[in-house]
C-alpha cells in the first residue's frame, strides 16, 4: 500500500531513492511469483518444493528490510516516511490479548513559557506486539490425610483428581500442546524433546510418544463421531495420500494410505460447517473406501482413482469427477512445446473455470441455472471435439491417454452442470491433504499401523478446527480434560469441533 501523500518527502533525491528501492523489491517479488507459478503448473522436473519457494520469499523480504534499515539510518527523513507507512499498514492487534500499559509522561507540569500549570489535553497511544516465551510450570496437588484419634483404622483423604496419564507427569494441557506441535505445526517428537531440554525439562522422545498414544486412544470415539456426522451429509469429497509406515519384519517401510473425507459447502452457501476426517488403511484396495463409507448415500466428489467406481457400483453413491485432474493432463502436454490439441482443450476448460469464478458464493440453484445456460453448451461441444481428435492421433500417445481419461469419466465430469452443490473439481479435499504431507515430510514415516491410525485421529480433529477457526490447542486441552473427568459417550456431539465455534462464527464459515 502506498504511503499517504502528506507522508512523502519533498526532497526529490529522497523520493527517487524510495522509488528505485520499491522498483527493485517489486521485480524481486515478480520473480518469486514466477517461481510459484512454475511450481504449481510447470513440469514435475522443473518444479520446486513449496517450502523452498517460501524460503526464497523470506530471504527476499529479509534482504529488503535490511536495506531499508541501512537507508533509514543514513537519512532521518526517510525513517519518518517509512514509520508513517508502517502505522498506516500494520492493522490492529487482537482485542482478546492482555494489555500491559506503560505511561511515558513529562518530568513536570510547569509551563516552560510562563511557569503556569499545564493541563492534559489528550494523549497518543501506540501498541506493540510482545511475546513471553513458552514457560514450563509445575502444578502441585496436595491431598491432606486425616485420622481419628479414637479409631486406629480410620484414614480419610480426598480422591485424587482423574488424569490422562495416571502416575505420569503431564497435565492434559501439556499433552494437547504436544499434539498440536506434532500434527498442526509438524514438529516431530524428538525435536520437541530437544526444545524442552533447553529449558531444563528432560523428557525422552518415547515418553512423549506414550502421551500421544494415550491421547489418541482417548480421542478415538470423538474421531468416529466426527466421521459419522460427515457421512450423514448429502455430498462429500474424497482423496487419499501415501503414509509410509515402518515394517520391522522386512527392515524397511511399507506404503499405507491415509484416506481423507471432507465436507465444505461454503462455495454455495450451505448451512453445514466444513470438516474433514482421515482414515488410515494398510493399502489402496477398493475395499477400503467401501468399508469407510458404509452408510453414506450421496454424491462423492473424487479424482480418477478406480476404487471409487467399485464403491459406486456397490453402494448408493453418485460420483462427481474432477476437472482439475483433466486439465492437469492436458497442461503437462501443452507446456513443453507446441501442442495445438492440448492447448485448445486447456482454453475450453479455462472458460468453464472462468464461469465458476463468477458464480462462487451464490446459492446452489443460482449456480445450477448459470451452468445450464453457459457451461452446458461448452461441455456438450467439448465431448464430440475430443472424440474427433482421438480418431486422428496415435492411440499410443500421452495425448490419446489424456483424452481417454476424460471421456471414460464423462458422466461424472458433467454432474456439476445439473447440481449446484457440486464443485467443478476436487480441490477442497486436496487442500486438506497438504497438512498430512508436511507432517509426513518431517516425520518421514509412521512407526506402525497403530501410529498411522493415531495420526489420522488427531489430524482429523485439528484440521477440522482449522477449517472453522477454532484454536486447536484450547479445543484439545478442553476435550481431553472433559473426557478424563468422565464426559459420557452419549453426548459426544458436545466434544466435536463445531460445538466450540459460536453460531455467528459457524454462520460466517458456512
Image (cartoon, rainbow, N blue to C red):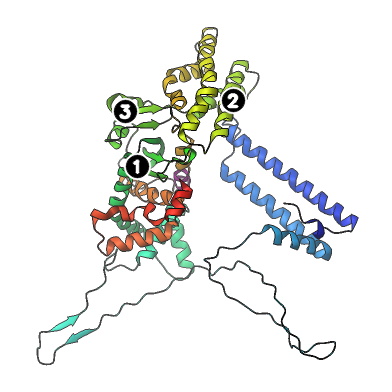
Residue bearing the label numbered 1: 230
Q: CA distance from mark 3 to mark 1?
A: 17 Å
Q: Residue at x 70, y 62 (%)?
A: 87
Q: Can the viewer see residue 397 in this picture?
A: no
Q: Residue 95: where, in percent of width, then height?
A: 55, 65
Badge 3 element? helix
Q: Residue 371: where, in percent of width, then height?
A: 51, 26
Badge 1 element? helix
Q: Is residue 354 above or below residue 75?
A: above
**Residue 355 on the magenta segment:** no
The answer to which image quadrant residue 72 occupies is bottom right
Disc ID at residue 351:
2
Q: CA distance from mark 2 to mark 1?
A: 32 Å
Q: Earlier in the sequence, mark 3 or mark 1?
A: 1
Disc ID at residue 311:
3
Badge 2 element? helix
**Residue 438 on the magenta segment:** yes
Q: Residue at x 76, y 55 (%)?
A: 3
The answer to which image quadrant residue 281 occupies is top left
Query: Which quarter of the image is occupied by the C terminus?
Result: top left
**Side of 12 relative to 452 (left or right):** right
**Side of 307 relative to 329 (left or right):** left
Q: Is residue 62 above or below residue 346?
A: below
Q: Range of the magenta residues?
A: 435-441
Q: Residue 489: where, in percent of width, then height?
A: 24, 55
Q: Is residue 120 above or below residue 243?
A: below
Number of the front mark, 2 or 3: 2
Other-residue count near label 2 (Cα within 10 Å), few / some / many at <14 / 14–19 / ≥20:
some
Q: Earlier in the sequence, mark 2 or mark 3?
A: 3
Other-residue count near label 3 (Cα within 10 Å), few / some / many at <14 / 14–19 / ≥20:
many
**Side of 122 relative to 310 (left or right):** right
Q: Residue at x 48, y 63 (%)?
A: 195
Amino acid at each position: 500500500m502506498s504511503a499517504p501523500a502528506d507522508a512523502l518527502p519533498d526532497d526529490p533525491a529522497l523520493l527517487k531513492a524510495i522509488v528505485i528501492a520499491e522498483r527493485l523489491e517489486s521485480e524481486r517479488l515478480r520473480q518469486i511469483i514466477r517461481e510459484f507459478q512454475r511450481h504449481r503448473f510447470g513440469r514435475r522436473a522443473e518444479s520446486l518444493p513449496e517450502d523452498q519457494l517460501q524460503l526464497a520469499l523470506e530471504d527476499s523480504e529479509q534482504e529488503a528490510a535490511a536495506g531499508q534499515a541501512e537507508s533509514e539510518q543514513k537519512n532521518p527523513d526517510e525513517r519518518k516516511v517509512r514509520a508513517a507507512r508502517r502505522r498506516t499498514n500494520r492493522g490492529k492487534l487482537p482485542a482478546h490479548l492482555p494489555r500491559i500499559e506503560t505511561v511515558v509522561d513529562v518530568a513536570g507540569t510547569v509551563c516552560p513559557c510562563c511557569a503556569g500549570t499545564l493541563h492534559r489535553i489528550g494523549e497518543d497511544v501506540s501498541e506493540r506486539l510482545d511475546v513471553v516465551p513458552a514457560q514450563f510450570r509445575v502444578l502441585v496437588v496436595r491431598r491432606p490425610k486425616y485420622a481419628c484419634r479414637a479409631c486406629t483404622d480410620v484414614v480419610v483423604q480426598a480422591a485424587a483428581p482423574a488424569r490422562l496419564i495416571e502416575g505420569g507427569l503431564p497435565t492434559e494441557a501439556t499433552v494437547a500442546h504436544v499434539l498440536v506441535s506434532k500434527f498442526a505445526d509438524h514438529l516431530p517428537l524428538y525435536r520437541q524433546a530437544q526444545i524442552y531440554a533447553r529449558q531444563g525439562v528432560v523428557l525422552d522422545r518415547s515418553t512423549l510418544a506414550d502421551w500421544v498414544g494415550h491421547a489418541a486412544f482417548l480421542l478415538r470415539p470423538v474421531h468416529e463421531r466426527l466421521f459419522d456426522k460427515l457421512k450423514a451429509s448429502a455430498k462429500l469429497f474424497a482423496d487419499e495420500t501415501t503414509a509410509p509406515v515402518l515394517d520391522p519384519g522386512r527392515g524397511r517401510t511399507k506404503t499405507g494410505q491415509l484416506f481423507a473425507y471432507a465436507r465444505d459447502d461454503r462455495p454455495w452457501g450451505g448451512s453445514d460447517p466444513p470438516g474433514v476426517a482421515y482414515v488410515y488403511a494398510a493399502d489402496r484396495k477398493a475395499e477400503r473406501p467401501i468399508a469407510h463409507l458404509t452408510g453414506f448415500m450421496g454424491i462423492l466428489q473424487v479424482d480418477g482413482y478406480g476404487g471409487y467406481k467399485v464403491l459406486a457400483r456397490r453402494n448408493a453413491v453418485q460420483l462427481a469427477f474432477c476437472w482439475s485432474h483433466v486439465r492437469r493432463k492436458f497442461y503437462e502436454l501443452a507446456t513443453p512445446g507446441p501442442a495445438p490439441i492440448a492447448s485448445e482443450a486447456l482454453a475450453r476448460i479455462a472458460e468453464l473455470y472462468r464461469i465458476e469464478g463468477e458464480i462462487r458464493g451464490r446459492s446452489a440453484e443460482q449456480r445450477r441455472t448459470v451452468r445450464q445456460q453457459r457451461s452446458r453448451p461448452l461441455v456438450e461441444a467439448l465431448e464430440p471435439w475430443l472424440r474427433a481428435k482421438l480418431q486422428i492421433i496415435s492411440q499410443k500417445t500421452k495425448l490419446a491417454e489424456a483424452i481417454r481419461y476424460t471421456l471414460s469419466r464423462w458422466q461424472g465430469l458433467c454432474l456439476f452442470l445439473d447440481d449446484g452443490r457440486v464443485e467443478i473439481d476436487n480441490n477442497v479435499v486436496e487442500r486438506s491433504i497438504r497438512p498430512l504431507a508436511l507432517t509426513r515430510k518431517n516425520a518421514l514415516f509412521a512407526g506402525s499401523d497403530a501410529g498411522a491410525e493415531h495420526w489420522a485421529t488427531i489430524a482429523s480433529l485439528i484440521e477440522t478446527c482449522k477449517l472453522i477457526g477454532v484454536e486447536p490447542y484450547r479445543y484439545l486441552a478442553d476435550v481431553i480434560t472433559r473426557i478424563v473427568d468422565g464426559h459420557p459417550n452419549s453426548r459426544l456431539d458436545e466434544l466435536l469441533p463445531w460445538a466450540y465455534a459460536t453460531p455467528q462464527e459457524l454462520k460466517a464459515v458456512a
